[in-house]
Image: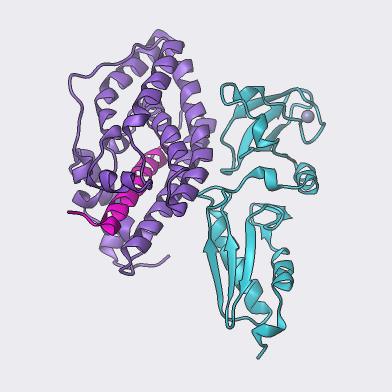
C-alpha cells in the first residue's frame, strides 16, 4: 500500500513525464517545420512543455526529499520508472500526425490543468494555473490546423483522418486512474479523471465535425504507462535524451 | 563588511528594479511583474520571482542578475525562489510599461479578458509603428514564448504582439 508521500510523488512524476516526453517529441520539429511559422510554433510549445515538466519534477524531487533534483529525475531514471501517457511518446510522424496528436493531447491538458487549478495542494494548483494559460494557445493552434487540414485537400483530409484513426486507441489511457489517484482524490489534491471524459469527447467530436473528419473508433484501448510499461518508442527517446548524463554522470553545463 | 541590517527591503527592491528583462531590454523585471517580493532575514536575503512562461529561458539569466546585484551591495547570502502562485498575468503591466513596449516596436498586450479563444484572429491589435487597426495575425507563436507574430496591412511592416496571458 502506497503512503501519501509516495502517492504525491508518483502523481507529480506522471504530470512531469507527460510534459517532458511531449515536449521532447515536439522539439524534434526544430528546423523541420513545413513553414518557418510552424517551426517556431511547435518548438515554442515544446518549450512550454519542458518548462511544465521542470516545474512538476522539481516539486516531485522536493516531495521525495532525498536530495535529487528535477534533472536527476529526468535524466537518470530508467524506462520502467517513467509514467508518461503512451500518446506522448509516439513518434511525430508527418505534420498531420503531429497535429492530430496535438489536438488529442491539448484538449485533454486544457481541461486537466483547469481542473487542477482547484487542487488542495497550492503548488500543484499554481503550476496548473500557469500551464492552463499556455495550453489554451496550444489548443487553438491544434484546432485551427485540424480544421485547415480537414477541410483542405483530399490528401490533407485523408492523412489527418488516418492519423486520428491510428491515435485513437491511445486516448483511453488518459483517463485511467491508479492507486495514487484514489489516495489523492480523497484529499482533493488530484482530480477525478472520469469527470473529464464527457467534456473531452464533446470537444473532440465538435472540432472533428467542423473539420470534416469522422470520429475515430478503436477496437480496444492501449494501456500500461501507469505501471511503467511503454511502447518500444520510449526507450529510443530516453537513449537520446539521457545520453549525456549517462555517458558523463553529473556533467554540468 | 557591510551588515545586512543596513539595508531595507524597499532599498533592495529599488536596486532590483534596475534589472531588465534580457529579451526586452526596455522594461525592468519589476515592470514585467516578474519580481514579486524581497524578504530580509538575519543573515540572508530571499528574492521571490515568478516566470512569465514556465519554460521562459530568460529566467536563469534573471536569477543570476538578481544574485549579482545583491552581492554588489554587500549581501553575500542570496536565495532566489520561484513561485507560480498567483500565476503571472500581462494584466499586471502598467500603461506606462505598455507604452515602453510600443515604442520598442512591440504591440502591448490587450486585457486578458479581450481574448476570444474561438476566434483568436478577431483580437483588435494596433500596429506599434503606424497605430493602424488593419492588422493580421500571422502566428500565435513568435520569436519568444510571450509574443505572437502580426503584420500591418497599412504600413506593411511585420511586428510582434505581446500575447495577453
Ligand atoms: Zn502599421
Q: Name the main secondary structure of what is drawn in magenta.
A: helix
A25 falls in the magenta region: yes
Q: Residue at x 69, y 38 (%)?
A: B109
Query: Looking at the picture, does residue A196 appear above or below residue A244?
Result: above
Q: Colour of chain B?
A: cyan
Would residue A96 be visible to someone looking at this image?
Answer: no
Task: Name the residue at the front extreme.
Answer: A186
Number of numbered discs on residues: 0
Residue A30 falls in which quadrant of the image? top left
Is A247 positioned to the left or the right of B72 in the image? left
B128 falls in the magenta region: no
Would residue A190 be visible to someone looking at this image?
Answer: yes
Q: Residue at x 25, y 49 (%)?
A: A82
Residue A32 falls in which quadrant of the image? top left
Whole-percent x and y of residue B61?
57, 61
Q: Residue at x 49, y 39 (%)?
A: A132
Quadrant the N terminus of chain A occupies: bottom left
Q: How is the image coloured?
A: by chain
Q: Residue at x 18, y 45 (%)?
A: A227
Task: Name the residue at the bottom extreme.
Answer: B1
Whole-percent x and y of residue B22?
64, 56
Q: What stretch of residues is rendered in magenta? A: A1-29
Is B104 positioned to the left or the right of A29 in the image? right
Quadrant the C terminus of chain A occupies: bottom left
Whole-percent x and y of residue A154?
39, 8
Q: Quadrant of ligand 1?
A: top right
Q: Colour of chain A?
A: purple
Q: Nearer the viewer, residue A135 or B127?
A: A135
Whole-percent x and y of residue A144?
50, 21
Amino acid at each position: 500500500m502506497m503512503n501519501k508521500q509516495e502517492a504525491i510523488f508518483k502523481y507529480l512524476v506522471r504530470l512531469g513525464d507527460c510534459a517532458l516526453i511531449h515536449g521532447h517529441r515536439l522539439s524534434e520539429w526544430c528546423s523541420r517545420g513545413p513553414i518557418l511559422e510552424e517551426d517556431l510554433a511547435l518548438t515554442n510549445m515544446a518549450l512550454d512543455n519542458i518548462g511544465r515538466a521542470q516545474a512538476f519534477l522539481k516539486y516531485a524531487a522536493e516531495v521525495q526529499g532525498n536530495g535529487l533534483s528535477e534533472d536527476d529525475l529526468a535524466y537518470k531514471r530508467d524506462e520502467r520508472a517513467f509514467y508518461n501517457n503512451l500518446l506522448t511518446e509516439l513518434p511525430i510522424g508527418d505534420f498531420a500526425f503531429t497535429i492530430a496528436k496535438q489536438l488529442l493531447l491539448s484538449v485533454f491538458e486544457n481541461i486537466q490543468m483547469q481542473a487542477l487549478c482547484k487542487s488542495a495542494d497550492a503548488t500543484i494548483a499554481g503550476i496548473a494555473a500557469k500551464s492552463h494559460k499556455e495550453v489554451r494557445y496550444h489548443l487553438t493552434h491544434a484546432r485551427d490546423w485540424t480544421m485547415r487540414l480537414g477541410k483542405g485537400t483530399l490528401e490533407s483530409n485523408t492523412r489527418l483522418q488516418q492519423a486520428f484513426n491510428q491515435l485513437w486507441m491511445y486516448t483511453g489511457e488518459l483517463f485511467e486512474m491508479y492507486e495514487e489517484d484514489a489516495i489523492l482524490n480523497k484529499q482533493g489534491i488530484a482530480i477525478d479523471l472520469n469527470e473529464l471524459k464527457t467534456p473531452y469527447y464533446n470537444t473532440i467530436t465538435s472540432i472533428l465535425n467542423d473539420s470534416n473528419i469522422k470520429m475515430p473508433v478503436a477496437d480496444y484501448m492501449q494501456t500500461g504507462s501507469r505501471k511503467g510499461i511503454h511502447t518500444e518508442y520510449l526507450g529510443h527517446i530516453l537513449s537520446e535524451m539521457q545520453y549525456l548524463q549517462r555517458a558523463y554522470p553529473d556533467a554540468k553545463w | 563588511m557591510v551588515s545586512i541590517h543596513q539595508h531595507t527591503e524597499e532599498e533592495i527592491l529599488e536596486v532590483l528594479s534596475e534589472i531588465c528583462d534580457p529579451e526586452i531590454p526596455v522594461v525592468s523585471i519589476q515592470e514585467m511583474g516578474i519580481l514579486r517580493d524581497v524578504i530580509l532575514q538575519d543573515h540572508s536575503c530571499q528574492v521571490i520571482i515568478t516566470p512569465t512562461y514556465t519554460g521562459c529561458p530568460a529566467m536563469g539569466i534573471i536569477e543570476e542578475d538578481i544574485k549579482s546585484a545583491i552581492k554588489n551591495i554587500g549581501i553575500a547570502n542570496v536565495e532566489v525562489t520561484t513561485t507560480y502562485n498567483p500565476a503571472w498575468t500581462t494584466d499586471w503591466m502598467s500603461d506606462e510599461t505598455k507604452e515602453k513596449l510600443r515604442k520598442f516596436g512591440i504591440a502591448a498586450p490587450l486585457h486578458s479578458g479581450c481574448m476570444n479563444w474561438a476566434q483568436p484572429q478577431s483580437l483588435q491589435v494596433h500596429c506599434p509603428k503606424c497605430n493602424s487597426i488593419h492588422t493580421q495575425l500571422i502566428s500565435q507563436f513568435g520569436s519568444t514564448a510571450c509574443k505572437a507574430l502580426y503584420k500591418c496591412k497599412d504600413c506593411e511592416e511585420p511586428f510582434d504582439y505581446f500575447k495577453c496571458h
